[in-house]
Image (tube, grey):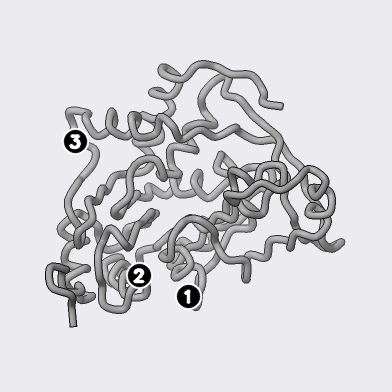
Amino acid sequence: MTTPGTPAPLSSAELAAQLRSLGVRTGDILLVHSSLRAVGPVRGGARGVVDSLLEVLGPDGTLVAYTQTPDNSDPSRWALTRGRTVPASEWARLRETLPAFDPARTPSYGVGVLPEEVRTRPGALRSDHPQSSFAALGPAAARITADHALNCHLGEESPLARLEELDARVLLLGVGYSVCTAFHLAEYRVPGLGSRDYGCAVADGSGRRWHRYRDVDFDTSDFPALGDAYEALPDFPVTRAPVGTADSRLFDLAPAVSFAAKWLTEHRPRRGPVE
């Protein structure tokens, strides 16, 4: 029974029809960022949404989700990554005790419920990065998730670069460009972009250890303006339509990354390393 004034839950068939109307095709390799709250009620919840996506993609398509774990981070940055501050006197102890990332068991953090539904599906594969992993279901999953370099969040040695090679598409399902991970791949191609130190707990053949590395200092503050600029191009590279109650967008990943690299190069000031 639905509450008066709220939409009736979408069935799997209705959701699949709306995804097809947006432009999702059989055989697509599709990177999805989503807000199921924005989509509205769907029969089966996250399971029903993933079922509909897989139905539309068919047996030759591959569904990909970002299963980040930024909570596995240096305690000095927990105000940003976990939303709480810990005293500096606790940092050393926490670096020694924070559980190591396990791609088979560590849940994603801060990306909603759909990535967890993808990650925990039978047959799903997940990349090995302890902070910026991706999970995938479908025939291209192994290629997409393999060889995610430990020192590369979202660059040339990450699943994003494999998705670019495979002519993947991006679905923003009820979310905006601020969460578009494809734009992070473009950041790696901006001359003079700043970098900073990262830390996380990892497990390897010798056991658990604290790993430090240096990578891009990411910044999403201008991603909405970047997305709006891309969407406004005269060749209409972005398809936009409602899915459920969610304003949703669909576009090809590779040309969006190419545009983003040029746009960011022109619009961002160059910065040195962040200490």
What residue lies at 83% left-to-right and 46% top-to-bottom? 89
Identify the secondary structure beneath mark 2.
Answer: helix
Of the residues shown, which amino acid type is indicated by label 3? Phe
Do the numbered discs 1 and 2 sit on residues whose CB atoms are within 8 Å?
yes
Query: Which residue does the numbered mark 2 point to in the structure image?
Result: 50
Residue at 46 percent across and 35 percent down: it is 220
Q: Quadrant of the N terminus?
A: bottom left
Graded by Cα atoms within 10 Å as few (under 14), some (14 to 19) or many (20 or more), the crowding at tag 1 reads some
Question: What's under tag 2, amino acid-wise?
Answer: Val
Mark closest to the chain's N terminus, 3 or 2: 2
Judging by the rendered image, the residue that carries numbered circle 3 is 236
C-alpha gap between disc 3 and disc 2: 27 Å
- What amino acid type is highlighted by mark number 1? Arg
Disc on the earlier residue, 1 or 2:
2
Circle 3 crowding by C-alpha within 10 Å: few under 14, some 14–19, many from 20: few
- Residue 168, compared with residue 6, is above or below; it is above
